[in-house]
């Protein structure tokens, strides 16, 4: 593992929610530069905020057509795929709404992406989804000034948001097992920490800077334990702030 490319959404992009302005920003987030330095690898992060797996598959094919110098591709999708058009859901009382990417399509697309990567002689690695906070996300939806009664009817209960998200996470693990590829379980970082308010932003879906620091530490530990990578000794860095090493990719 020397040349790594990341395809994913806003989580791997390193987006966080500014708690004061309630706006998303890129200047804080996952410290890919630290990962490069600690693991002595080169990372090309092509994640995009709002990306679904369908968008990611399209960009992956375009990228591989260029025959890039890369030996490992990391995938992180599912967070946007499992989401709904909440304004549409609020417009009419019904159970018949579909997420942005239905679960069968999500699984099929993930399988096709992994097969394509392997066919090019490149190692695929999937990341699990970070946990979400259903109650926080429900409140975040309500700020849209939409008919929450219809939202409640569709959900049945607020925790349905979490269960639906978990279904996509389970699917990622099933695919990794089915195709016998490696995964890094970043969800474990959240499930093993009882400080939920410190881990998840007020929108209920994005990791905080504190959580992103733990994600980076976990990824480093997992890579060192699974692969023949020599850790580079670095001076201890302060916990916060975390600098962002990412580029915009259209």
Image: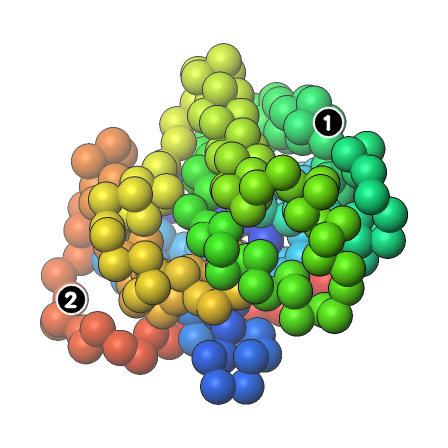
* Total residue callouts: 2
Q: Is residue 26 left or right of residue 200?
A: right
The percent coordinates of residue 197 (x first, y second) are 34, 64
Q: Which residue is mark 1?
A: 105
Whether residue 245 can be seen here: no
Classify mark 2: helix, strand or loop.
Answer: loop
Classify mark 1: helix, strand or loop.
Answer: helix
Q: Which residue is mark 2?
A: 234
| Residue at image coords 49%, 79% | 18
Residue nearest the observer in this picture, 163 or 79: 163
**Mark linked to residue 189:** none
The Cα–Cα distance between marks 1 and 2, rounded to whole angstroms, is: 43 Å
Residue 68 appears in which quarter of the rendering?
Answer: top right
The percent coordinates of residue 208 (x first, y second) are 39, 66
Above/below status of 65 relative to 215: above
Neighbor class of circle 1 (other Cα within 10 Å; few <14, some 14-19, many 20+) is few
């Amino acid at each position: 593992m020397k040349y790594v490319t990341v395809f994913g959404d806003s989580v791997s992009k390193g987006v966080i929610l500014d708690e004061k302005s309630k706006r998303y920003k890129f200047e804080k987030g996952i410290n890919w530069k630290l990962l490069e330095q600690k693991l002595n690898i080169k990372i090309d992060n092509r994640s995009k905020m709002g990306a679904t797996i369908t968008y990611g598959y399209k960009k992956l094919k375009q990228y591989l057509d260029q025959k890039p110098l890369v030996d490992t591709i990391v995938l992180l999708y599912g967070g946007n795929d499992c989401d709904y058009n909440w304004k549409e859901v609020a417009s009419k009382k019904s159970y018949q709404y579909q997420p942005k990417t239905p679960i069968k399509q999500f699984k099929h697309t993930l399988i096709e992406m992994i097969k394509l990567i392997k066919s090019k002689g490149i190692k695929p690695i999937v990341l699990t989804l970070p946990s979400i906070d259903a109650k926080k996300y429900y409140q975040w939806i309500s700020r849209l000034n939409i008919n929450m009664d219809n939202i409640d009817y569709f959900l049945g209960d607020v925790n349905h948001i979490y269960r639906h998200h978990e279904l996509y996470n389970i699917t990622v693990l099933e695919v990794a097992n089915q195709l016998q590829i490696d995964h890094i379980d970043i969800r474990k970082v959240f499930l093993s920490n009882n400080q939920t308010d410190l881990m998840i932003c007020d929108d209920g879906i994005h990791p905080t800077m504190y959580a992103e620091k733990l994600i980076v530490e976990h990824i480093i530990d997992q890579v060192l334990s699974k692969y023949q990578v020599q850790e580079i000794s670095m001076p201890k860095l302060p916990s916060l702030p975390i600098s962002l090493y990412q580029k915009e990719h259209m």
